[in-house]
Image (spheres, rainbow, N blue to C red):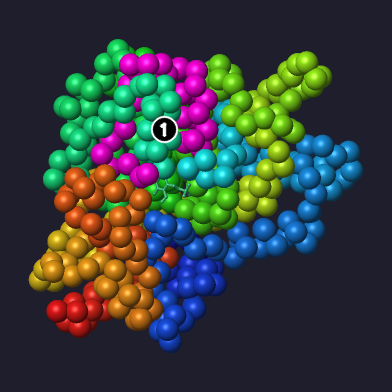
Amino acid sequence: MIASKTINKIELDINNIRLDFPILSKKINGKQLIYFDNGSTAQKPKRVIKAIAEYYENQNSNIHRGVHSLSQEITVAYENARINVQKHLNAKHAHEIIFTKGTTDAINLVASIFGKNRISRGDEVLISAMEHHSNILPWQQICLEKGAVLKVIPINDDGELIMSEYKKLLTEKTKIVSVSHVSNTLGTINPVEEIIKLAHEKNIPVLIDGAQAIAHKSVDVTLMDCDFYCFSGHKLFGPTGIGVLYAKEALLNSLPPYQVGGGTIKTVTFEKTVFADLPFKFEAGTPHIEGAIGLAAAIDYVNAVGLNNITNYEEGLLAHASFELEKIEGVKIIGKAKHKASVISFIVEGLHTLDIGIILDQQGIAVRTGHHCTQPLMARFAIDGTVRVSFAFYNTKEEIDFFIKGLIKAIQMLK
Ligand code: PLP
């Protein structure tokens, strides 16, 4: 399943890779499934499915609290999963990795604890015009609660952040910047290093929403120097219900717990609680143990394929699909940033995106339609929604060609 030969862009050993994903041989409406909805959730390789089955068949027990062998074994596996994530993100310490339910949960965690402690009336929180609702609402709500102001970095018509405006929006009132690494709707790869550097010049911490970046490129939080980074396991070929918040040790130590209860304490009396050290202070209750085990297996799988190979291969898919789409009369791609991940949004003049999605589904092609949880972004482009195709490394040029034919057919049927 490793890269075989090189043409233009890296060519992966796709046939073998595809065999690793059982669902890819499924038929939908009597047609071979073509899965282009990876931005919503990615498919799972056998390695992940087996790791979860193995957990329930052979390892099931609760972590951290048992002296018996099973509990100790699974505690080691759970903590090894944390170390796996730490290495994958190149974080300095394993205790800077907090397991969450996903990206949304991680951003809510930060908005809640950071917001309650560091944001006051008149302060500003800075996000961007291309954010997913999960990186808008937690900040909007904390701003409402605190009397703070939500400020928005504008984007240009290609779907890129206007950095000169960003610089102007960074003021002594800005308490935190929270932006996506990769836009789920436009595919834009944001210049996160520059965003962080500029914010840090004014001592402003930065959260990077990595939900859409994590499956497409290698992420180094130490090099990036972000203060918070989060992602969801299910978009990285792992299970649903597990995600990661990375945060710098000093920040985590300076903030109170998010939720409290079992697992978060050193000692409890009815009068007083002494909270546990990192990372346990932030992981209340029995966690998603098999989620962490499955996520670690997904990371191992992705590393075996090679993230650089994945990035290069997907660049080839993106270029091919963009080129073919632009040839179709009436198709307009929304989001033409210079740096893009393998996500393409488009509209077709005079047609409703939902109708296109339904006709493609009849041909076995899974795409996403609608606003993609980015309604303010839709408003920016004065559209209701788009059709979005988002590729993973198990997708092929042949699938794209089939999709293009399917789309032409859908357009002919609907016109
Ligand atoms: N942020 C971005 C950029 C996303 O694309 C998504 C999901 O699509 C999320 C946040 C929310 O992720 P989750 O639903 O896994 O919490």
Q: Residue furthest bottom?
A: 30
Helix, strand or loop for disc 1: helix
Considering only vertical position in the picture, is 276 above or below 38? above
- Give the residue at x 23% y 57%: 384
- Give the residue at x 49% y 63%: 43
Q: Is residue 96 visible?
A: yes
- Give the residue at x 60% y 39%: 99
Bounds of the magenta segment: 106-133
Considering only vertical position in the picture, is 373 above or below 278? below
Q: Nearer the viewer, residue 83 or 37?
A: 37
- Amino acid under disc 1: Gln
Q: Nearer the viewer, residue 389 or 112?
A: 112
Considering only vertical position in the picture, is 109 above or below 49? above
Look at the image and tell me in which quarter the C terminus lies. Answer: bottom left
Q: Which residue is mark 1?
A: 141
Is 224 positioned to the left or the right of 250 in the image? left
Q: How many marks?
A: 1
- Give the residue at x 67% y 35%: 284
Q: Nearer the viewer, residue 137 or 216?
A: 137
Say whether residue 258 is magenta. no
Considering only vertical position in the picture, is 324 above or below 405? above
- Badge 1 crowding class, 10 Å Cα cut-off, few under 14, some 14 to 19, many 20 or more, is some
Q: Is residue 341 visible?
A: no
Say whether residue 132 is magenta. yes
Occupied quadrant, residue 390 = bottom left
User: Percent x, y for residue 90?
Assistant: 50, 34
